[in-house]
């Protein structure tokens, strides 16, 4: 039986699909939520990846992709939207190749994405890194997988150095020069390394993945500075975050958050699955100005929550997202979305059931919630200086939502997924 709320959502979906985007003069936006300024329809699903902002904050970039096990053919693109209106500025067509990473913006304004092409049966047949200009023109394309050796990247996202170099994982961790040539490679393990590198303030590259301990490397040569194992269950899908003192925070698939010093020693670990619960972590940590670490969980018993951990490794609070129906399995309530910290101390994140939440960063109390037309998986919000939160849902819509923040928390060392609005893997 279709419920009243389900009929409402279906009707709104049809209405929004009828137009390219809706602005504040459109009654559809008001019907969704007064906070929503516009909704842009991209035309293809957005399962992996998060919005990234241009250096001037006026353009938002998103790439389209299908879920891991989907074999449905589709035409995919990297799309640039105007932040003020949601209007499309340009579209970089990729054909059957999906953007299976967040776009990463370099200091020169160019955008780098990791793309993969699937066969009609769902297998992956090619993997490459693509860099385009701020105007959407091809700068270079670098294949990193050939035929059957191509791997499912999925969760990997490029990190961009201050000189425009690219650090990205497929079957190995690759360092690419700004022109796309290979500088060095590390960690060929015979499996896909579905993880992302992060870059410290001094340029040090940090990387951890399944069968790869947390490793610090010199950016020019790839020389290993130190390595620190993170336990037997060392799957890492989340991106490492870096604190003010250089500490590296890594959320593992076994639901343990590790704090590792800049010298490579484990300072503490926090087991978010303790006390008889179970969970995993796909949400990447964000670190606030006071050192609090925020992240979400998936597959948690009794249901996924948002955690706030003090810089000493002690629990500060947990937030249980409100408004979840009693007749729906908690398996649909996962928090893949990584949180973003606003200038007013609010923590914002997306929810698999189709919600965007604002939570007080100090007390963990809910400030507000906005419903979206579809669920939100890996998309993590970007936040403009004007207080507009940008996030995408799985059906390929990008939402612009009004907040009380004036951009990212300025003194936070790692206020958002991949370090900041450019999703470059560094602050």
Image (cartoon, rainbow, N blue to C red):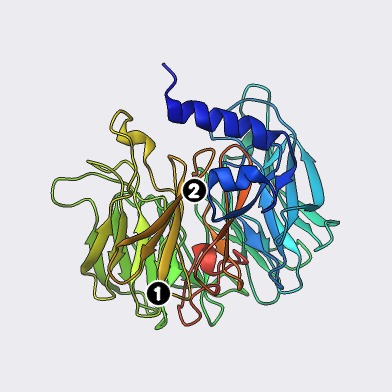
Vertical arrangement, residue 269 with respect to residue 94, above or below: below
Front in this rendered view, residue 333 or 211: 333
SS for dot 1: loop
> Is label 1 or label 2 in front?
1
Residue 412 spot, x, y in % from top left: 45, 78
Decide if residue 48 is in sight here. no
Please give the residue where the numbered disc 1 appears in the rendered image. Answer: 288
- Percent across and percent down for residue 91 are 80, 48
Residue found at the far top of this picture: 1
In-front residue for pair 358/240: 358
Whole-angstrom CA distance, mark 1 to mark 2, is 35 Å
Q: Quadrant of residue 97?
A: top right
Residue at 33% over, 30% down = 328
Viewer can see residue 86: yes
- 242 left or right of 78? left
Give the numbered dot on residue 189. 2
Report the residue at 13% width, 51% height from top: 275
Q: Quadrant of residue 396?
A: top right
As drawn, 204 above or below 63: below
Q: Secondary structure at mark 2?
A: loop
**Between disc 1 and disc 2, whose residue precedes?**
2
């Amino acid at each position: 039986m279709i419920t009243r709320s389900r009929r409402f959502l279906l009707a709104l979906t049809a209405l929004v699909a009828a137009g390219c985007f809706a602005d504040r003069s459109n009654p559809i936006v008001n019907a969704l939520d007064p906070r929503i300024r516009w909704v842009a329809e991209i035309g293809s699903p957005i399962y992996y990846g998060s919005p990234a902002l241009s250096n001037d904050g006026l353009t938002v970039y998103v790439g389209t992709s299908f879920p891991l096990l989907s074999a449905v053919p589709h035409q995919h693109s990297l799309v640039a939207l105007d932040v003020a209106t949601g209007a499309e500025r340009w579209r970089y067509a990729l054909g059957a190749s999906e953007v299976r990473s967040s776009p990463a913006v370099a200091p020169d304004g160019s955008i780098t994405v990791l793309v993969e092409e699937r066969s009609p049966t769902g297998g992956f047949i090619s993997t490459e890194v693509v860099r385009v200009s701020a105007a959407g023109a091809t700068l270079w394309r670098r294949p990193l997988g050939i035929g059957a050796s191509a791997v499912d990247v999925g969760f990997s996202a490029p990190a961009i150095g201050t000189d425009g170099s690219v650090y990205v994982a497929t079957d190995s961790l690759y360092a690419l020069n700004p022109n796309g040539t290979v500088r060095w490679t590390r960690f060929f393990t015979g499996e896909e390394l579905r993880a992302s590198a992060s870059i410290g303030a001094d340029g040090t590259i940090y990387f951890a993945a399944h069968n790869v301990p947390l490793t610090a490397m010199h950016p020019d040569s790839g020389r290993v500075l130190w390595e620190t194992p993170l336990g037997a269950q060392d799957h890492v899908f989340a991106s490492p975050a870096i604190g003010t003192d250089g500490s590296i925070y890594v959320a593992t698939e076994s639901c343990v958050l590790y704090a590792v010093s800049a010298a490579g020693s484990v300072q503490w670990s926090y087991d978010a699955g303790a006390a008889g619960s179970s969970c995993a972590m796909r949400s990447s940590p964000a670190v606030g100005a006071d050192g609090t670490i925020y992240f979400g969980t998936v597959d948690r018993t009794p249901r996924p929550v948002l955690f706030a951990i003090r810089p000493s490794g002690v629990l500060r609070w947990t937030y249980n997202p409100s408004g979840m129906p009693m007749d729906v399995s908690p398996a649909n309530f996962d928090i893949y979305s990584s949180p973003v910290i606003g200038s007013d101390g609010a923590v914002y994140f997306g929810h698999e059931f189709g919600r965007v939440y604002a939570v007080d960063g100090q007390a963990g109390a809910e400030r507000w919630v906005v419903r979206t037309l579809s669920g939100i998986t890996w998309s993590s919000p970007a936040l403009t200086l004007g207080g507009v939160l940008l996030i995408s849902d799985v059906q390929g819509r990008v939402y612009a939502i009004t907040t009380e923040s004036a951009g990212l928390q300025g003194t936070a060392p790692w206020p958002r997924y991949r370090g900041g609005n450019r999703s470059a893997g560094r602050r």
